[in-house]
Structure formats: C-alpha cells, structure tokens
Image (cartoon, grey):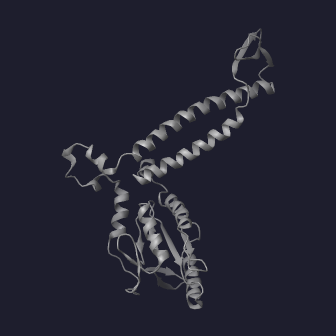
C-alpha cells in the first residue's frame, strides 16, 4: 500500500507543478470570446463578464487573438488538471485510510485460502524467486557484526543495513554479497562480490557498493580495483552501478540512499507495463 501512495503522491506533485505554471499563463480577464463572420473574413471580439460592450481584438493572425486562444486553452487544461488532482487526492486518502488487512477482508471469503502470490505478474514473481534462490556468496564471513537489518539479517556495516532495509521497503528484489565472475581490464576472469545485486525487469543487472572505510589505504586501493573491474565488464557509475559512502565521521545519509533507490527503481522497471509500475 505504501508504494501505491508514494506513486500517487508523486503524480500529485507533478499536477501541482503544472497547475502553478498554467496559473501564471492565464492572466487575462474572464469573459466571452466572440467571433463574427463578415463576407470572407472573421473578426474577433472579447466581452468582459458583467459588461455589455465588446472589445475588438483583430483577425485570426492578430497577436491579441492568439493570446486569447492560448488563455482559453490554458483555462480548459487547468480545469481538467484540477479535476484530476481531486481524483488522485481522494484516491490517496482512500488508500491511506484502509489497511491491507481491511482490503483483504473486503474480498469474498472463498478466496481466503488462495496464495496471494498467484496474483503477481509472472516476471515479477520470477525476480523474487531469483532473489531468494540459493547462490554462491562471498566466503568472507562477519559473525561478530552488530549491524542487523529489520528482518534479522546480519550485515557487514551500518550503511549496508540501511541499503538492505530501504531496498526491502521499496519492494525491489535483490541479492547480497553474491559472488560474480567479471572480466578485468586485461581480459582475465576474476570473481568479486558486490554488496547488492539487482536483476531488472528487462533482464539486465545493477550492482551497488557502499563504502565504509575510505580512510583505510588497503580498503581504498581494493575498491579502486573493483571499480576498474566493474567498468571493464560494462558497469557504468550512475547507470547500472551505484556507489554510496559514509562521511568522514562514519555517518550515513539514509535520505541520499533513498534518492538513489528512486533512480534504481526506475531502471529496475524499464520495460515493465504501467500496471506493474503502479503495483510496485
């Protein structure tokens, strides 16, 4: 439910932005736009509301006439946008005020024993199954880590825990510490384990790395080598490869991670039908 509300809230913000822009365009007086056909020409006039006299504007090529037409079009669009805004606002209110449990209870009881996963789109179901299937992991373990994700998964660092929780909240299926084979700049096959691996709707992949010890020379050199290996294998920073890091005081900006997840989600859903995008 949260993802649907977030999507609709984003649409509402776009409509508000359009309404604001159009409101600055529709600056002409309210009134009646008139056209009179005489012989082979059409002449245009404008009468303000509450007045009997009319003002001559010119012919179809007149700047004033074109301006009034633009004004009328903007007003008409404004009316439609305001109707859309009210509809979306009411929808958000309706969804926000009803819990998933209430919605499930409104479904006839004969559906109660049917697994809800059956209603997922097949491709999305495949991606969740891919994320939950056993895979080769980084052999390095960290049993003493105190960084625990919301579902109890032990993570290497605070930053990785934040990524794990926010990706889960965004309904994006992923793998952690998945050991992959890459081609380095010399054409040799090497194995590395990105912090997170995401398979997109179109079958391509995204890798994510969070850096927590940039003051450690060995760690920094190792990561620079990783970047070179990823790039040699076709991963481009900001496209299908995303990096975040702790600051100098070991602080982690969860808002920055959430903004990046917004970009990742768009990339994850490339090629997906509109109904899937709304679902997620």
Q: Would residue 113 be found to the left or right of residue 75 on screen?
A: left
Q: Would residue 36 be found to the left or right of residue 111 on screen?
A: right
Residue at the far bottom in the pictured view:
218
**Could you say which is closer to the camera, residue 82 or residue 202?**
82
Q: Is residue 105 above or below residue 61?
A: below
- What residue is shown at x 76% (from left), y 16% (from top)? 45
Residue at the far top in the pictured view:
39
Q: Would residue 266 be found to the left or right of residue 165 on screen?
A: right
Q: Position of residue 96 (x, y in %)?
A: 41, 47
Q: Is residue 239 above or below residue 191?
A: above
| Number of numbered discs on residues | 0
Res 95 visible = yes
Q: Residue 145 occupies which quadrant of the picture?
A: bottom left
**Could you say which is closer to the camera, residue 88 or residue 72?**
88
Q: Position of residue 106 (x, y in %)?
A: 27, 43
- What residue is shown at x 41% (from left), y 68% (from top)? 174
Res 185 visible = no
Q: Position of residue 172 (x, y in %)?
A: 43, 62
Check the picture and name the quadrant holding the C terminus: bottom left
Q: Residue 220 occupies which quadrant of the picture?
A: bottom right
- What residue is shown at x 59% (from left), y 80% (from top)? 249
Q: Is residue 12 above or below residue 3?
A: above
Q: Position of residue 138 (x, y in %)?
A: 41, 83
- What residue is shown at x 53% (from left), y 49% (from top)? 10
């Amino acid at each position: 439910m949260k993802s649907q509300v977030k999507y609709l809230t984003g649409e509402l913000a776009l409509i508000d932005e359009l309404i604001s822009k159009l409101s600055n365009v529709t600056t002409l007086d309210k009134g009646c736009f008139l056209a009179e056909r005489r012989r082979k020409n059409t002449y245009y006039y404008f009468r303000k509301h509450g007045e009997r006299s009319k003002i001559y504007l010119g012919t179809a090529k007149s700047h004033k006439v074109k301006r009034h037409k633009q004004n009328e079009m903007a007003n008409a669009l404004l009316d439609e946008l305001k109707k859309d805004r009210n509809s979306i606002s009411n929808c958000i209110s309706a969804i926000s005020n009803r819990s998933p449990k209430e919605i499930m209870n409104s479904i006839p009881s004969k559906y109660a024993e049917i697994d809800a996963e059956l209603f997922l789109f097949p491709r999305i179901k495949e991606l969740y199954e891919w994320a939950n299937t056993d895979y080769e992991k980084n052999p390095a373990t960290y049993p003493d880590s105190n960084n625990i994700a919301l579902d109890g998964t032990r993570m290497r660092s605070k930053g990785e825990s934040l990524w794990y929780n926010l990706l889960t909240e965004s309904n994006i299926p992923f793998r952690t510490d998945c050991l992959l084979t890459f081609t380095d700049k010399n054409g040799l096959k090497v194995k590395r384990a990105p912090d997170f691996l995401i398979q997109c709707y179109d079958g391509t992949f995204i890798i994510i790395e969070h850096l927590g010890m940039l003051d450690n020379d060995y760690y920094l050199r190792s990561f620079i080598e990783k970047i070179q290996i990823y790039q040699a294998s076709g991963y481009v920073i900001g496209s299908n490869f995303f990096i975040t890091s702790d600051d100098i005081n070991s602080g982690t900006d969860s808002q920055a991670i959430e903004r990046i997840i917004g970009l990742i989600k768009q990339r994850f859903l490339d090629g997906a039908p509109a109904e899937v995008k709304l679902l997620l």
